Image (spheres, rainbow, N blue to C red):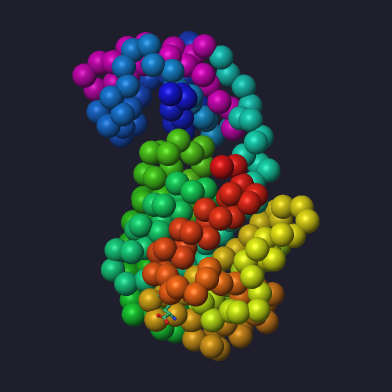
Amino acid sequence: MSARRFMITSRAIRDGYASFDGELFNHIVRVLRLSPGDDVQLIDENGVVHYGIIDQVAKEWVAVKITASGPVADSISIAPRITICQALPKGEKINLILQKGTELGAHDFWLFGGRRSVAKLRDSQQDSKLERWKRITAEASRQCGRIDIPDVSWRPSAVEAANDAGHELRLIMWEGERDHSLKESLSVGSPPSSVIVAIGPEGGFDPLEVRHFSQRGFQPVSLGTRILRTETASIAILAIIQYTWGDT
Ligand code: SAM
């Protein structure tokens, strides 16, 4: 099994050892049940990867003996930065989208209030919801061994989201699209540096929203004739883009 990766701060390293207590200890020892002799990779805030072997597991802390250190392989930098521009869905669906999107390598999530979003986000809820959403991406990053944590941001409407997009390739998932195939949109020459994909809520996009996205350079693309749930569309398109240009 390839070594598990954890994000650390370089402060945890002293005299050739890294030691952890708290959440990271709990994840390594209690959740993953790693034990002395297991290989780990520790990525610090400077983009340095420290290769190590678990040396000691105590009641509330774990020590890793560092065997080598070096820059993180730049394989990760060739994949385009993928932004999932997601209309807020009902209930807890957003948790699934954030978790699976993080596992599938989304660079960041722009959430917005779709005209047909059933769920509404009041200003007073914004901070607490963003905090909760960021906890989900942080936890998912740790679980899948990512060396970065996707950011989550909020925009009140599709218009703001469309206006903010400066990505090289812009797609809007539109089940009504019949002319433009996804294959065409993804068969551009070299991989784009950045991609943003807009996905509508349960009630879909309002035609005015589709028009605004199109005016901002978003290409409507279809995932076929079946109507997918918003979370299915979000996860599927991310996997397809990663398969086409990413690091999977
Ligand atoms: N308009 C849909 C209907 O008639 O039931 C409702 C929207 S669908 C549940 C949620 C979102 O997923 C859509 O706004 C779209 O972004 C995406 N989506 C669903 N099926 C799709 C498909 N076949 N092709 C492209 N996008 C799709």
Residue 60 located within the stretch drawn in magenta: yes
Residue 177, quarter of the rendered image:
bottom right
What are the residue bounds of the magenta stretch?
Answer: 47-67
Q: Is residue 154 visible?
A: no
Front residue of 218 and 158: 218
Query: Residue extending furthest left?
Result: 59
In the rendered structure, the answer to whether residue 210 lies left or right of residue 120 reads right
In the rendered structure, the answer to whether residue 181 lies left or right of residue 190 reads left
Residue 147 x/y as whole percent? 51, 37
**Looking at the image, which residue is at 41% across and 52% down?**
100
**Looking at the image, which residue is at 52% across and 53% down?**
239
**Looking at the image, which residue is at 38% across and 38% down?**
143
Q: How many marks?
A: 0
Whether 25 is drawn above or below 189: the answer is above
Residue 78 located within the stretch drawn in magenta: no
Quarter that holds the C terminus: top right
Our reading of the magenta stretch's main secondary structure is strand
Query: Residue extending furthest right?
Result: 189
Residue 213 x/y as whole percent? 61, 78
In the rendered structure, the answer to whether residue 217 lies left or right of residue 233 reads right
Whether 224 is drawn above or below 12: the answer is below
Residue 79 x/y as whole percent? 64, 46
Query: Residue extending furthest bottom?
Result: 208
Quarter that holds the N terminus: top left
Q: Is residue 85 visible?
A: yes
Front residue of 236 and 102: 236
Front residue of 1 and 7: 1
**Looking at the image, which residue is at 59% across and 32% down?**
47
Residue 110 x/y as whole percent? 50, 64
